[in-house]
Amino acid sequence: MQKENLLYKIQPADRLSEVKEYYFSRKLKEVACMNAEGKDIISLGIGSPDMPPSEETVRVLCENARCADAHGYQPTVGIPELRNAMADWYRRWYGVDLDPATEIQPLIGSKEGILHVTLALVNPGDQVLVPNPGYPTYTSLNKILGSEIVNYNLREDLNWQPDFEELEQMDLSRVKVMWTNYPNMPTGANATMELYEKLVDFARRHNIVVVNDNPYSFILNRKPLSILNVPGAKECCIEFNSMSKSHNMPGWRVGMLATNATFVQWILKVKSNIDSGTFRPLQLAAAQAYQNTAEWHEEANINVYSHRRKLAEEIMQTLGCSFNEEQVGMFLWGRIPDDYADVEELTEKVLHQARVFITPGFIFGTNGKRYIRISLCAKEDKLAEALQRIKACFE
């Protein structure tokens, strides 16, 4: 019997109309095609550390993965060894005391954390404050979840910090959450205690939860700070942290959030219905990584990136871009010359003529449309070659 060809009229959920495929997902497909054609593109786009974790971290993973009883489901709250290690790390490096049993929640990463916090705190139609420029996922996930996004400006003349006078003039009555990210990505603006104190005061006065995303505090930065250093911050703030950048573990997917016990329980209600606990040997290895020495961090997070940063600065100068030398983190953010019509005129020329991929700042918001971002997650020889290619095209 011949089957009829039926024309199905299934449509995607309406929420998909609110977002596009992630820029890097789309652009790296183009880069992959160019590489397949033999063009050998040097990618300075993604912030994915290219160095390994500490040897002790890998050893603990391998040893525990061989245990016959290590492969079962794990608790969503994370194993005590990991939570205790996270609390100890916060105490040693930030001077912040956290109860490992009630004030910490391990995460698979910040993206997951954005999802869980939004589901736990924000009803569809509630407003959230999102920085412009800022991490694109703050916008895309909140769009998917039905939040009303209110952008707040970060500007170079304010060192990429919120304009609190401007914020105070806004109607904040429906705002539930304010997303912040210091040290800042993409701009490299560092955290300060004065900034954190202003954010905590703002949150308390307006009954808003400030969520500070803090994965870059160790990169090119010898004085890591936490918003939880501010007295009373736990009552109104949540802080994300991640092992991806600080411990060279991006593919391991280990992060955390720290806040008061009530917020943790609300978030756990969401998380426990969405995913399960991480592989036990990986959690034990992460607990080991949190014990990395100050010397390890000095070499991995300071020395290596310092050498790479000098080459990135030369690339910026060759392109005629201006930048703040006080930036921290694993990127270099620079303003393009005025004679370019837009940033893509520059980045597409660099890609197709110099065969180097750098990130246009518009993907982080309208306030980034005259800027570029260079990743330091490439070996020195690759950065040096990228510099030579760009010099050949632009000098």
Image (tube, rainbow, N blue to C red):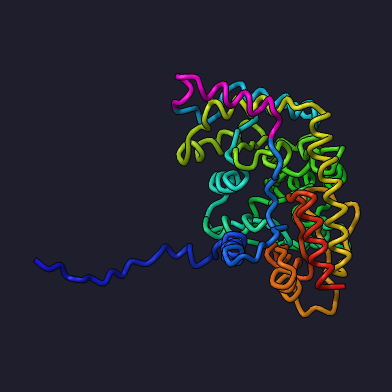
Residue shown at 80%/43% (left/top)? 219
Residue 52, compared with residue 335, is above or below; it is above
* Figure disc tally: 0
User: Residue 22: x, y in percent?
Assistant: 58, 60
Q: Quadrant of residue 12?
A: bottom left
Which quarter of the rendering shows the N terminus?
bottom left
Q: Quadrant of residue 323?
A: bottom right
Residue 254, compared with residue 177, is above or below; it is above
In the image, 369 versus 191, the foreground residue is 369
Residue shown at 47%/41% (left/top)? 274
Residue extending farthest to the right is 325
Is 213 on the left or on the right of 19, as rendered?
A: right
Q: Which residues are magenta?
A: 53-72
Which quarter of the rendering shows the C terminus?
bottom right
Residue 307, compared with residue 17, is above or below; it is above
Residue shown at 65%/26% (left/top)? 287
Is 121 on the left or on the right of 340, as rendered?
A: left
Q: Quadrant of residue 127?
A: bottom right
Residue shown at 73%/25% (left/top)? 291
Q: Magenta span has 374?
A: no
Q: Magenta span has 68?
A: yes
Residue extending farthest to the left is 1
The answer to whether residue 349 is visible is yes
User: Residue 251: x, y in percent?
Assistant: 60, 42
User: Residue 229: x, y in percent?
Assistant: 80, 35
In the image, 150 versus 76, the foreground residue is 76
Residue 31, compared with residue 305, is above or below; it is below
In the image, 213 versus 68, the foreground residue is 68
The answer to whether residue 162 is visible is no
